[in-house]
Amino acid sequence: MSALDSWYVQNGKVYGSISDMNANDDKVDYFYIDTCNNEVYITPYYKDFENFLDKRKIDTNKRDYMSGNNIVAPYQDRHPYDKNYQCPKD
């Protein structure tokens, strides 16, 4: 992971980008995890990832993975997270 890796946290969903800072190339993978239904998706293809998010009705304004909402300081005031999220009951 590197300081450029960013993600969004929305309820029980986490998605964004991740890279290998030790790799010799600029490989970036895109990921989506839904903690409530155990769905995991990882792809190196940006367009496939965008299509995947479209199918899950993820707002396009919540896809700026270089927003600063990143792994370096996930608890900054501008990006509050609630570690106590409860998945809805069926």
Image (spheres, rainbow, N blue to C red):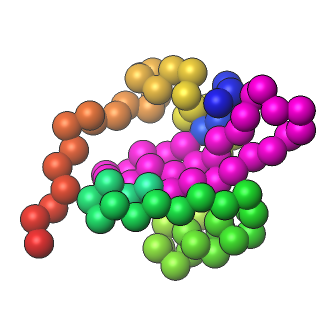
* Residue 39 in sight from this viewpoint: yes
**Quarter assignment of residue 60:** bottom right
Please tell me whether residue 46 is drawn above or below residue 16 in the rendered image. Answer: below
Q: Residue furthest left?
A: 89
Q: Is residue 8 magenta?
A: yes
Q: Position of residue 45 (x, y in %)?
A: 75, 63
Which residue does the image show at 44% across and 55% down from the upper left? 33
Q: Position of residue 76 (x, y in %)?
A: 45, 21
Residue positioned most to the front: 23
Q: Is residue 15 magenta?
A: yes
Can residue 59 be seen here? The reply is no
Is 18 above or below relative to 39? Answer: above
Q: Position of residue 2 (x, y in %)?
A: 68, 27
Nearest the eye: 75 or 32: 32
> In this rendering, is residue 43 above or below 84?
below
Q: Say which of 51 and 59 sits in front.
A: 51
User: Residue at coordinates 52% horizontally, 79% vertically from top-left?
Assistant: 55
* Residue extending furthest toward the bottom: 55
Q: Main secondary structure of the magenta part?
A: strand
Residue 36 in picture, x, y percent from top left? 27, 59
Residue positioned 60% across, 38% down in the render: 6
Q: Report the label total.
A: 0
Q: Quadrant of the N terminus?
A: top right
Quadrant for the C terminus, please.
bottom left
Give the answer, above or below, for where 69 lies relative to 16: above
Q: Write down the region rendered in magenta.
A: 7-32
Residue 75 found in image quarter = top left
